[in-house]
Amino acid sequence: MSGFEQLLAEWDGMGVFIRRDAPTESWIFIALHDTRQGPALGGCRMRVYPTPVDGLRDALRLAEGMTQKWAVIGFPYGGGKAVLALSRPLQAAEREGLLRRFGRVVESLNGSYATGEDLGTTPADLALVAEETSYVHGIDRGTGRSIDPGPHTALGVFAAMRASLQHLFGDPELRDRTVLVQGIGDVGLPLVRLLRDAGASVLASDTDAERMEAATRLGAAPVAPEAVYAAPCDVFAPCAVGAILNADTVPLLQCRVVVGSANNQLAESEVAEQLHTSGILYAPDYVVNAGGAIALPMFSQGASEAEVRQRVEQIGVTLGEILREAAARSESPLHAAQRRVEQVLAR
Ligand code: PHE
C-alpha cells in the first residue's frame, strides 16, 4: 500500500479532502474526524513537511485532537483540521496564492469545515482566507481583521498550570516555581509574559534566535534546544510541535508536571502511562490548549473579552476535575479525559 492508503486504512475519521496545489508544489489536506456534534472546525497549519504523507499524517492526528477538544469543552463542533503541506518555503506572492486557493476550497465545502489560525499561519493569513470564504472563525466582519487565538490559548495553559500545581502541592501559585517553555511562538511568548507577571522563574527554549531573544527580553533564561528535555524544572510546557513526548525523551524529563499548548504532545497514547508510572503528572494537551478553540467561536458570536476570558479560565476547573478523578481511580489523567470525551461523543 502507498503511504496515503496505509494512513487512511488505519484512520477512524469521517473523511479527507485532498488537493494538490500545482503552482506552489504543495498539498492541501482537510481532515474531518468526528462530526456527530456539529460541523468540523479547526485551524489551518502550514509548514514544510519531508513528504506529503507526513502532512497527511499530521492532518489526521490534528483533526482527531480537535474532536477531543470540542468534546471536553462541550462546544457543538466536530473535529477537523487543515494542513497546507509545503515542499519548500514559499515567497509572499506564492503564499498568498495558496491561501486564496485554500479559501476557495473551504468555501466549496459549504460549511462542512470552517477554519482558523494554527501553527505556521498568522491572523493576516486568515484575513486573506476570509476574503475567499465566510467559513473562517475569529474574523471581525467590521474591520476584516482576524483575532489571534494565541494569547487566549496561553491564558488557558496558565489556568491549567495553576490547577496542576494546586492538585500536586495544594497551592496554585506560580511564584518561585520554575517553568520551562518549549517554543516561543504565538502561544509560548504570551505564556512567558503571564508566567513572569506571576513571579515564576521562566526558562525558554526555541530553535529560532529571534524568538529566543524575545523571551530573554521578558526575563526568561535560555535553554539550548538539545538540552530542553533534561533541564530541571517544576513545570514543562511544550508549546511547539507534537510527538515530543516519546520513549526517548520521557526518561530524560526532570519535571513534576507537563502542561503545554502543543497539539498531540504524545508520540503514542501509551506514553501517558509511561509518564504516569514515572510519577510525572501529564495534563492532557487537548484539555490544556482549548483556549483558542473557546475564544474563536465565542468572538464570532459576539462575546465580550471578559466573557471569553472567564470561559477560558474554566479550563483550570475542568482539568482539576480530571486530575482528581484520575487520582481517585489510580489512572493516568489521559485515561480520565478520554472517558469524558467518549461520554460526550456517545450522547
Ligand atoms: N489552532 C488552534 C487550536 O488547535 C486554535 C483554533 C481552534 C483555530 C479552533 C481554529 C479553530 O486550538
Image (cartoon, grey):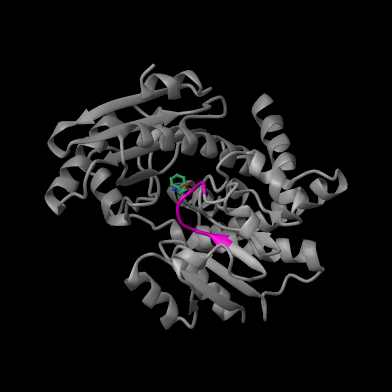
Overall secondary structure of the magenta section: loop
Question: Above or below — where is 154 with respect to 324?
Answer: below
Question: Above or below — where is 12 with respect to 27?
Answer: above
At a point 52% along the width and 26% down the height, the residue shown is: 35
241 and 285: which is toward the camera: 241
> Left or right: 327 with respect to 175?
right
> Left or right: 312 with respect to 185?
right
> Left or right: 19 with respect to 35?
left
At a point 64% along the width and 66% down the height, the residue shown is: 235
At a point 51% along the width and 67% down the height, the residue shown is: 227
Q: Give the residues in magenta.
A: 237-243
- Quadrant including the N terminus: top left
- Quadrant including the C terminus: top right
Residue 139 spot, x, y in % from top left: 35, 50
Residue 134 spot, x, y in % from top left: 31, 38
At a point 55% along the width and 79% down the height, the residue shown is: 196
Q: Does the magenta stretch include residue 239?
A: yes
Residue 68 spot, x, y in % from top left: 59, 38
312 and 34: which is toward the camera: 34
Q: Is residue 248 magenta?
A: no
Residue 96 spot, x, y in % from top left: 18, 47
Tell me where residue 198 sits by quadrant: bottom right
Residue 243 visible in image = yes
Q: How many labels does the image show?
A: 0
Residue 145 visible in image = no
